[in-house]
Image (cartoon, helix red, strand yellow):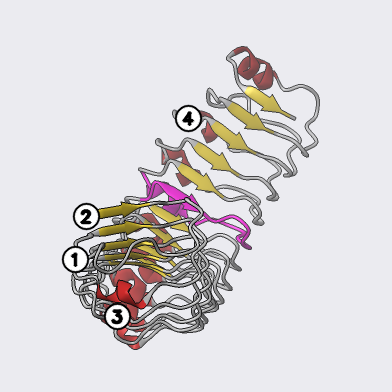
Amino acid sequence: MDTELRAPGAGLTAMPGTASELARTRLIDLAWNELTELPGWVARLPSLEELRLDGNRLRALPDLSGLDELRALHLDGNDLTAFPSCPPHLETLFLYGNAVRALPDGLPHSLRHLSAGRNGLTGVPGGLWKLTGLRSLNLAENALTEVPAAIGGLGALRMLDLGHNRLTALPPELADLPLTDYLYASDNGLTEVPEALGRLDRLAYLNLTDNRLTRLPASLGRMASLMELRLYNNRLTALPDSIGALGRLRELHLRGNRLTELPGSMAALGELRVLDLRDNLLSSLPGWLARLPRLSHLDLRNNRLRELPAELPALDRLDLRWNKLDGDPPVLRRLAEQGCVILR
């Protein structure tokens, strides 16, 4: 028998083959079928290294702890309510979009990637924070109310998603993580973020949208690798001057706050391409906007603008809707002649 069984999206309602026929199989991909159960013999396939069962209708699994060779298990989008013991050398476990209320206590130390979002978890086993080889962790869209200080022990973590939970605080120990790719903490109940967050100086993407933040720590400016910062739908009335130190920042999303002005330090954001200021309380714009050499998209919808600066950068798109500008500012004619799309 072939060492691979691939039949994704084939409309299968039962597992094809037999234990003897699949004894040498290393990869089984039956994602996006109509499977409601797995035969018990799947848990005894001696050569199986990767099992892909995303998007089926599985409600339970046999005990897979005997699959010594299994390295990757993909179970996103099923109907699982529990997860049995893990295979001992598993490296990738994807459980997103099930109804698993509790993760197993014995998660293997070999685990590198864990996705358990959208499961209704109210907590996770303490052993999770001891998985020092874990590189990506998705706990989004659950019902978590706290993250313990022990998270700081995940010394290899590069990507962390805690969005869409019920968190009211982030532990300072979060800054001990070597995060590089992204940190999501959107749609929680955060009223502040710890000053220690500034130590995440290798992080490229930070998302703190849809919280209750009224201020940002001055340490924000030490996050020197940030390329995208999303802060919309908070309660910010001002930005720290240190934001101007984010020399690699390309996108800054600030819509839905209570900003009345922008700090002059932002004139140093020479890599900024996108600036979203929609739904704030700006009554004027600073002249230094014209000195941002790479700014191409500027969203100013629903502020309190009556006039514009005499100069603006060579934009590709400018959105001014739901302001009440006086007259027809000459700067708009010049931008239109340069090919800028202007909405007003």
Q: Position of residue 240 (x, y in %)?
A: 48, 57
Residue 148 location (% of width, % of height): 39, 83
Between the C-alphas of marks 4 and 3, the distance is 52 Å
The residue that disc 3 covers is 107
Q: Main secondary structure of the magenta part?
A: loop
Residue sitting at 28 percent across and 71 percent down? 176
- Which residue is the site of mark 2? 3
In percent of width and height, residue 94 lies at: 39, 66
- N-terminal of the pair, mark 2 or mark 4, is 2
Which one is nearer the viewer's eye here, 154 or 106? 106
For discs 3 and 2, the disc positioned in front in the rendered view: 2
Residue 2 locus on image (x, y percent): 23, 52
Determine which residue is flagged by label 1: 47
Given the image, on which type of amino acid does mark 4 rest? Arg
Q: CA distance from mark 2 to mark 4?
A: 60 Å
Alpha carbon distance from label 1 to label 2? 9 Å
